[in-house]
Amino acid sequence: MAEEKKRVKKPTALKRIKQSMQKNQLNSQFKSKAKTAIKNFNKSIEEKAAKETLTKQLSLIFSLIDKGVKKNIFKKNTANRMKAKYSCKV
């Protein structure tokens, strides 16, 4: 049996892997930030916070969701569904 040659990855493939790992990390950080904002919003609703506080938090959530759509982290329809869901809670 012939020994299998060990494949050496080309520099462009290594660069692509590095870029995808960095992008994956940034995307997960962004999703985490959005989830934290949503958790804070839900907590405020349970505590029956003031209407002004809720609207500020809601605008923050909307902003994060829209930025996520722009960066292709969230799909457009998913974002619209999330926005409708949280706006009904106010």
Image: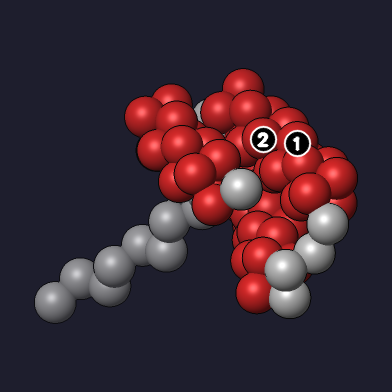
- Tell me residue 29's x, y (percent): 73, 57
Q: Which mark is residue 30?
A: none
Drawn side of residue 50 relative to residue 15, left or right? right
Q: Quadrant of the N terminus?
A: bottom left
Q: Identify the residue position indicated by label 1 in the image.
A: 59
Given residues 14 and 37, the one toward you in this image is: 37
Drawn side of residue 8 relative to residue 32, left or right? left
Identity of the residue drawn at 61% across and 48% down: 90
Farthest residue in the top direction? 70
- Tell me residue 34's x, y (percent): 68, 53
Residue 58 visible in the displayed image: yes
Drawn side of residue 12 relative to residue 37, left or right? left
Given residues 38 and 18, the one toward you in this image is: 38
Colour mapping used in the image:
secondary structure
Farthest residue in the left direction? 1
- Tell me residue 19's x, y (percent): 67, 41
Question: Which quadrant would residue 49 be assigned to in this image?
Answer: bottom right
Name which residue type carries label 2: Phe
Given residues 42 and 33, the one toward you in this image is: 42
Asked whether the residues under the numbered discs 1 and 2 touch, taking CB atoms below 8 Å apart as contact, a structural biologist would say yes
Q: Residues within 10 Å of mark 1 (few under 14, many from 20)?
A: few
Q: Identify the residue position indicated by label 2 in the image.
A: 62
Identity of the residue drawn at 73% across and 75% down: 47
In whole angstroms, how far apart are the C-alphas of marks 1 and 2? 5 Å
